[in-house]
Image (cartoon, rainbow, N blue to C red):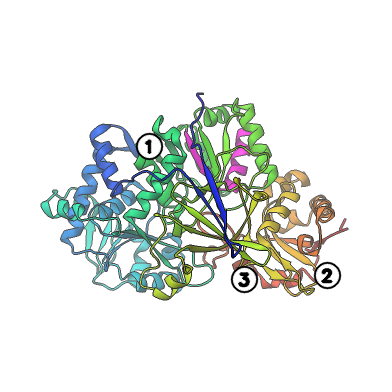
Amino acid sequence: MDKVRFWTPDIRQETRADGSILVWQETPLDDWPRALTDRLLHWAEATPDKVWLAERDTIGWAETTYAQAAEAVQGIGSALLARGVSAERPVLILSGNSVAHALMALGAQHVGIPSAALAPAYSLSGGDYLKLRDIAAQLTPGLIFADEADRYAPAIRAVFGADVPVVSLTGSVPDREMLAFDDLRATPHDDAMRAAHDAITGDTVAKFLFTSGTTGSPKAVIQTHGMLCANQQMVRQCFAFMEDTPPVVIDWAPWNHTASGNKVFNMVLMNGGSYYIDDGKPTPQGIARTIENLRTVQPTWYFNVPLGYQMLLDAFEADRALRDSFFAHAQMLMYAGAGMAQPVWDRLHRVAAEAGRDDLLITTGFGSTETGPFCLMCTEKHPASGNLGIPAHGVTLKLVPQGDKLEARVKSPSITPGYWRNEKLTAEAFDEEGFYMFGDALKFATPGDAAGGFLFDGRLAENFKLASGTWVAVGPLRARLTDDLGGLASDAVIAGEGHQALGALVTPNWSKLREIAGEALEGEALLAHPAVRHATAQALHRHAEAATGSATRVTRLIYIAAPLDFDKGEVTDKGSINQRAVLRHRADLVEALWSDDPRVIELGTA
């Protein structure tokens, strides 16, 4: 494979009198489009028959070309304008990733109407629909898209007024005006649609994305056309290889989250690539479908969470043909959503090398829903996981001393203007210079040298003190403990506030534990197996020996047997764990850490 082209960064840094540090790239950000659907129209003219989006059907991939998409988007935009939908009464999308979902969202964007895609679980989990009710109150939607209306009917009837119509592909909601999706996409284009599109500016709201709401009510983060387009220009200048080869992507991650809903989805559209919707997922039940899909699509750019890579590695090691097909055209692999444990990192590089791809960049970055999300990116190869890279073109990173930490703040053209209908939260999110405040700490990978990139140094709000008064940096410790457990765990939650020593609740790597046990056990029976407990105690001992003090040494742990609960906010729909939510909802396990509970594994446990 030819050398994959990335940016050639020219990093500058400045230390101010107050101790804060500014970091930026000297080369400016190039001009960006006015609206992303202008890129759709461009590709519909330049490459009309090229596959833009594809989803699985009963016989294979159902493909939608750029020309077909452009026609449908303009029809949907015309139909939405005729219905009086607006920023004050936006489109609410309750469904998962699909071609129809994409066309509805872009149809709205094309005429300056925002949409908001929600995690389907908000509508399908039953109960009181508390998060869905909160979102409905914030947005006051004027139209709902639900691909299979029958599935979403209970939530729609419980939460939304009878005057809000529903667009669907199949099914119906009783006592509700129903609109057929195919009728909307077939609507003739009109002058009103063209005028509305021409009126779009960088400040026009393109969509709303909700933060996960794991510490309270979900927040509607405003995404303007300007911020989305500027963010994609940042991506394009970083991933310079996309000018040579339009990306081929196969992706499962949800569009209600910024990683795929903004970055990956818009990256394909910006660069004239092809997006295959993976209807699998990195779960024991869903990974088989992902593997099946990867047998038919060879990605050039691939994203997954670390747990997903761990599951794929099992398949690659068992199936050389699958492995070689996956790596054949890959230009880079990206992980996010959680830190990648060093054993998984090393294993992924080894398998890539066995496929003849020891040149392949495996990397991550740093950003948030509020930053577009593209913000920092690492394009250098490193011997260990975790380097978040450097600021993208157009981004100024400010590091503000907070005790012994450096709090990360950023300013760029791709930062949100704030939270919809919430001036208080908006004001609290920015400092006096207009920098967005992540609430996260970063540290130099190479002390004092910004060109060497940055490492995550903890979420400031997650940190706590031991009884001794010593601060615990939770984020780095979670990653270190997961590494030190050597593949036995996929993640960890740190506990111990007010105690003399630290404990952890650990999510097990079930396949690794079954391998150690040598038996086909499940659940608590597997976790209690003597070989599993012995291997875990040994790993915990090695971790403790390498620690530098009580704030970096976990002395006891309990494996979490019951799956993490999305509805309780313990895990997000992208697969990452929320430390505080797990501690809150698993208080009984936290208490058990400092007891004689037989599930506890301590230093010295045999």
Q: Does 582 sit above or below residue 55?
A: below
> What residue is pinned by disc 2?
596
**For the residues bearing labels 2 and 3, Cβ distance under 8 angstroms:** no
> What residue is pinned by disc 3?
585
Mark seen at residue 437 = none
Q: CA distance from mark 2 to mark 1?
A: 55 Å
SS class, disc 2: loop
The residue at the far left in this view is 191
Q: Is residue 372 left or right of residue 603?
A: left
Query: Which is more toward the observer, 291 or 433?
Result: 433
Instruction: Count the labels in the image.
Output: 3
Q: In the image, what residue type sits under mark 1?
A: Ser
Please provide the residue range marked out in magenta.
299-317
Q: CA distance from mark 2 to mark 3?
A: 21 Å
Occupied quadrant, residue 129 = bottom left
Q: Please provide percent x and percent y for residue 485.
A: 75, 50
What is the magenta segment's predominant secondary structure?
helix
Mark seen at residue 274 = 1
Q: In the image, what residue type sits under mark 3?
A: His
Query: Which is more toward the observer, 61 or 260?
Result: 260
Q: Earlier in the sequence, mark 3 or mark 1?
A: 1
Q: Does 594 sit above or below residue 349?
A: below
